[in-house]
Amino acid sequence: MKKLFSLILACVLTVGTFAGCKAESAATNSAVSTNSDTETQKHINVAFFWISTGLDPAVDYDGWVTSRLGTSETLIKLDDDLKPEACLADEWKNIDENTWYFHIREGVKFTTGNQVTAQEAADSIMRAVESNPRAEEYLKIDHIDADGQDLTIVTKEPNAALLNNMAEPVFSIIDTSCSDDEIRSKVCGTGPYMVTEFVSENKVELSANPDYWDGEPGLDGITVTQIVDSDARAMSVQSKEIDLTNTIDNTTLKLFTGNSDYNVSSIISPRVNVAYMNNAETSPLSDVELRKAISYAVDRESYAGLIGGSAAHSAYSDSTPFGNETIDAIEYDPDKAAEILDEAGYIDTDSDGFREDRSGNQLKLKYLQAADHGSADSAILAQAVQSDLKKVGINVELLAVENLSDYQSSGDFDFYTANDNSAPTGDPQLMLETMYTKNASSGKQNLTGYQNDDIDRIIEEMNKTFDTEERYKLAAQASQILNDTAANLFLTNSYINMVSLAKVKNAEQPVCDYYFITKDITVE
Amino acid sequence: MSINDSRETVKNKYIEKKLYGRKGFLKAAKSAKGKWIRFGILLTVAVIVVAAAMFGHVFAPYDPVETDFSAALTAPGAGHICGTDNLGRDVFSRILCGAGSSFSLTFLCIAIISILGMILGAVSGYFGGIIDTFIMRVTDVLLAFPDSVFAIAVVGVIGPGLLNTVLALSVIWWTKYARVTRGLVSQMRSKDYITEARFGGAGTFKILYKYMLPNILPQIIIMATVDIGGMMLTLAGLSFLGLSTQPPAPEWGYMLYEGKSYLQTAPWVMIFAGLAIFITVIVFNLLGDSLRDILDPKE
């Protein structure tokens, strides 16, 4: 009797648990539908893989979030060819090597109701430069003059990358008359949407900006939730809890493509999956021959088949116009890798299947792997690289770490992976300067100790080269040098994608992944 | 029929049921013979599982870490009976070879915690006083921590890896054993045969080893067997979180993690690893139960 009772109790509890789940999701669904039902409000739920701890565009990379939210804009923005296009500035020109002129669009208002003038823009840019070292490196600014709607930026030295760098969301134009706290929770920008509620790393409620300068936004309200895990994002779309999200892993994307219940917008991005190699003396990878052999030993085409995207040919993604087609890429050739290793003196002396280093000591390379954007891709790449290197006799030890930056700053690694944007501002100089020189000291930076006089010379030349095509040629030269010195393992160019329910219209994945919510997105 | 009559009938029925009423294999055996049969069967299954784990690499049809990018995510079929994972590795071979590390880790952990717990518990119960208070307060503090969370914290500090996980779990799991041992030892300490042994000239170590240990051991063995399932699940949980085995070494918990992304597109990656854990845990839990039926002096 007692047993029967406990069995029944167990069943009831189990059913109760599941019923609980069901009831909960039903509740969220009904909350969502009431939201959209009342007075036929157009409202959607969006999932981001990252919502920052604050919404101040000048802090760290938080500007990328405010830009994705459609709450802040910059003077210019980048189109899908990575060319500058008018945004808050409707006209610009390069007056001389050190002087840039921007005309601020008339009649633009902040969400606070204040007009956007050149003075406001100047204050906003200077605020970014003062509070974010990355911003200072991007502009090399001397001073700014503001007069009515005319903005003149004078740089300390020639900075040809300035125009493109202006599109970086750290330079979002915000109302600096707002207090820092207000900016952190409300942005006070100019975008099509404004923040009505913000919960750090969790949720943002947006409503349409009635004064938006570029027409009426397509939706009345948006709820943006942070869902870190790619699979969880995919499932939330399938359960219709979320109407729109992005960066779904390639294998999961198959569930949505070709299904009329969903829209999928996918585009090859400037992002490159890189296995950075430690060039510092402390690492065996400081030997260029070893790096070269490793570069020949990895089968990039197959990796692209595993995680989607295409095989990388250089430090720059194939989606960039930086002349990848003109340079010699390192192709998969395990025999050549073995030959280089043999010649360089990496020989398996104790017959354990792995080569020893030149002085006969065990060679074991430490590969740090951390999940990027909640995707499983980095884990797959790490194991694929490890398995390919094993085939040529190089022993790689994988370490899945949460605190990657601790290892990086202590230099305690041979490889680390990252999915990095090779042209964050659509210009080749930024990535080259931050990752391959000692110039950058904040944000993304050169942690591998790579140094090359030719690269340094190209950067200097780029500063003074204002012609776009000439800059691209210099970029091609640089990526050839990086390939020749096997600076890092450039694995795949990654696709980025947006997935939405069929009712969501005009959700197109832009090449620049700091754009996401636009005024055009609407629902039927 | 009077109330007394019906009571009598119910009572008789109950006694009858208690004596002969063993209907299912999963129900606890009541007769001594039944207990032994049940134990024998479960032990055989457990031995088979352990043997499969220890010699899995011999039977494995493929190298568990050998990748074949062109055969990634192949469905179960003739070539690969459990399919392949995201890097084209044979899931069946990975499960067989992964068993070795899952089991050896579990047994290592159980050995460490039961011995450590027994020693500390015996010291605490036998000597009493301030040592007892100190050890018992430490166990109280450790018992207040959720074990997985504590293990995650420890691994977070000293870095991920097999031995670090074992260390992290050992630090927190021994308390149960210490408490049971202490209880038994402090009870026994005042028993006549211990007093007589002491008068007979036996030293502290001899008393603990020769007169107390045989009385403690059955309890500890029962606890340890029951704990195997729980420990295996905890370890699988930690390696699911990427804290234990580092890739590409096959491990069941980590295989679940890798399969998670393919739950909808290639469910076999996850299902077979999950099944392996399920079967093993249930076998050892039942074995522990049945061992208790046999060894527990109360029955």
Image (cartoon, rainbow, N blue to C red):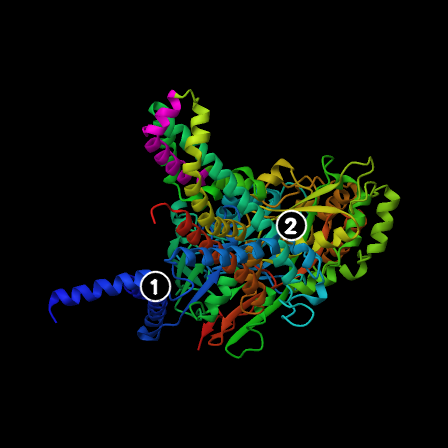
Secondary-structure class at tag 1: helix
* B178 left or right of B77 in image: left
Please tell me which residue is depicted at 43% across the width and 44% down the height of the picture: B147
* Residue A116 among those drawn in magenta: no
* B279 left or right of B60 in image: left
Farthest-out residue, right: A343
Chain that bears disc 1: B
**Residue A411 occupies quadrant:** top right
* B290 left or right of A258 in image: left
In the depicted view, which residue is nearer to us: A124 or B47?
A: B47
Residue A515 in view here:
no
* A258 left or right of B23 in image: right
* Residue B178 among those drawn in magenta: yes
Which segment is the magenta one?
A: B172-199
Please tell me which residue is depicted at 38% across the width and 57% down the height of the picture: B31
Kindly identify the amino acid type of the residue bearing the numbered disc 1: Tyr
Kindly identify the amino acid type of the residue bearing the numbered disc 2: Thr
Please tell me which residue is depicted at 83% across the width and 41% down the height of the picture: A349
> Where residue A170 appears, x then y in whole percent?
53, 50
> Where residue A256 appears, x then y in whole percent?
55, 73
> Where residue A55 appears, x then y in whole percent?
45, 51
Looking at the image, residue B202 lies above or below residue A177: above
Chain that bears disc 2: A
Q: Which residue is mark 1?
A: B20
Residue A253 in view here:
yes
Q: Which residue is mark 2?
A: A417
Please identify the dominant SS of the magenta region.
helix
Farthest-out residue, bottom: A260
